Image (tube, helix red, strand yellow):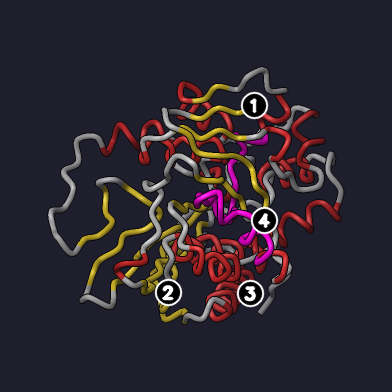
Amino acid sequence: MDSATRLRGLEAGGGCAAKYPAARLRELLAGFVPADSADLLVGLDPADDAAVYRLDDERAIVFTIDFFPPMLDDAALYGAIAAANALNDVFAMGGRPLVALSVAAFPEELPLGTVRAILDAAAAKTQEAGAFLAGGHTIRDEEPKYGLAVVGTVHPGAVWRKSDARPGDAVFLTKPLGTGLVLTGARRGLVGDAERDAATSSMTALNDRAAEALRPFEPNAVTDVTGFGLFGHAHELAERSRVRLVLDAAALPALDGASEAAEAGIRTGGDPRNRDFAADALTLDGLPEGLVALGYDPQTSGGLLVTLPAERAAVLAAAFAGRDLFLARIGSVEEGSGVLVR
């Protein structure tokens, strides 16, 4: 089968930038009555990165689904990134994936080899995560869309939520920012191949090793940074935990090429929607527009945003360094509300 056909005609709204606007999603769900079950440990009240249902005192299942249009025109990379992005929701809840199903929409004229490259790469990434790609559902559509529905397991007493940050916590990020800026900048000839390749390498990286390193430290709050950008996900975490996040602008880590793309005026389709969602909750304290754009940039398969007691911060940093894992301390948690970036 021909697998050389590339995915063309892509705009700035692929990957997690294609997410439904967070502000509209909140309005949509405002009248939705959450399910009432003692065993539904995580559902819509409040919503999180995945649903968690308790089976017994020792086992709970984690269930998530994530899919999006292509953010680049390499079929295998698209499949690997889409799979990693979905699998990472399970790691963000403290769980481990078990089995996944493909959620797919492809044009009929797309060569079978291209579709096969997407599926093969997703299957390989799922296996890397310790799970299996066991089937799925595919429909016809003019625009390709691909992702996974994933089931994992977690101990009922060890679920990570985004609603449990506490004053006195330190705030960490496990991947640098700027995937949307770099890929959009590369398509417009403003970012080089090396920077683009580093961004795709970050997006294909699972958060499994970061989650394993984090697990012994019993974090208070965890979420993964995806389509709502760092500022949007920080806003969610602060609001649901009823605390204030204080982020250090100088400590925000950026992928090579991201700052240059931002300063050149590059923005993805998700940038204005993320501003609509989070701007009222943010105090930016004279932040340069380039850093503002980095904070609002939709991330595809981004890192974990973590809070845990500050006294554990140094040992956590040493643990990540010992495993050659990226970790940036980017702020702290205080009494109050909203997000301050200074």
Residue 327: mark in rendering: 4
Mark 2: few, some, or many residues within 10 Å (few <14, many ≥20)?
many
Q: Which kind of residue does numbered mark 2 sit on?
A: Ala
Q: How far apart are marks 1 and 3 (CA)?
A: 49 Å
In the image, residue 140 above or below residue 257: below
Observer-nearest residue: 324 or 6? 324
Q: Which kind of residue does numbered mark 1 sit on?
A: Arg
Element under disc 1 = loop
Q: How far apart are marks 3 and 4 (CA)?
A: 38 Å
Which tag is nearer the camera, tag 4 or tag 2?
Answer: 4
The residue that label 2 is drawn on is 100
Q: How far apart are marks 3 and 2 (CA)?
A: 22 Å
Q: Which residue is drawn at 72% across and 62% down?
A: 201
In the image, residue 108 above or below residue 282: below
- Report the quarter where the C terminus lies: top right
Where's residue 217, x and y in %? 51, 63
Where's residue 110, x and y in %? 59, 64
Q: Which kind of residue does numbered mark 3 sit on?
A: Gly
Residue 113: mark in rendering: 3
Q: Which residue is drawn at 45% across and 39% down?
A: 167
Where's residue 332, x and y in %? 55, 39
The residue that label 1 is drawn on is 342
Q: Which kind of residue does numbered mark 4 sit on?
A: Leu
- Report the quarter where the N terminus lies: bottom right
Which tag is nearer the camera, tag 3 or tag 4?
Answer: 4
Element under disc 4 = loop
